[in-house]
Amino acid sequence: MNTDSFSDAEIREFYKLKNIAVVGMSKTDGKPANYVPKYLIEQGYNVIPVNPTAPEIMGRKSYPNVSSVPDQIDIVDVFRPSDDVLPVVMDAVKKAGIKVVWMQLGIHNEQAEKLAKEKGIKVVYNRCMLEEHQRLFGN
């Protein structure tokens, strides 16, 4: 699977955005959808869980979908199978202010990418937020 064509400098800029909604965030230790957001919290990011099956994750209120989050969201970080990403993005574009949709390692949906880009949202795909952060900032 290919990845997006953003340069390291562009990816670094995305990490200046602090409000990250994590779609598919997990309560289960050891799952990427648990330890990646935990790492982001440790790095000072405001992580907002989006998981309709959990009322709370890591002591933070969880929301059923992106559009129901009352707070500002800069990045929508997606931990869902590629086939499930389009409905996530269709919901996310209803919310103003989102700058980046980030599909984690192994995840890409061309229709979702196209829709987000049409709305002026940048799209990162097939990249892990933890791995890229460590690679670029050496944490």
Image (cartoon, rainbow, N blue to C red):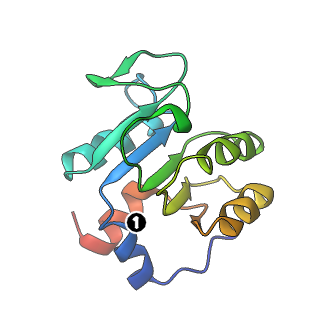
> x and y percent of residue 68 in the render?
51, 31
Q: Residues within 10 Å of mark 1 (few under 14, many from 20)?
A: some
Quarter-of-image position of residue 113: bottom right
Q: For this view, does 16 lie left or right of residue 49? A: left
Residue 31 in view in this figure = no
What secondary structure is marked by label 1? helix
Quarter-of-image position of residue 83: top right
Picture residue at 61% right of the left edge, 69% below the top: 120
> x and y percent of residue 88 in the render?
65, 41
> x and y percent of residue 35 in the render?
36, 38
Q: How many marks?
A: 1
Q: Nearer the viewer, residue 137 or 24?
A: 24
Q: For this view, does 83 lie left or right of residue 55? A: right
For label 1, the residue is 132
Above or below, 19 relative to 62: below
> x and y percent of residue 24 in the render?
53, 33
Picture residue at 61% right of the left edge, 46% below the top: 94
- Amino acid bearing label 1: Glu
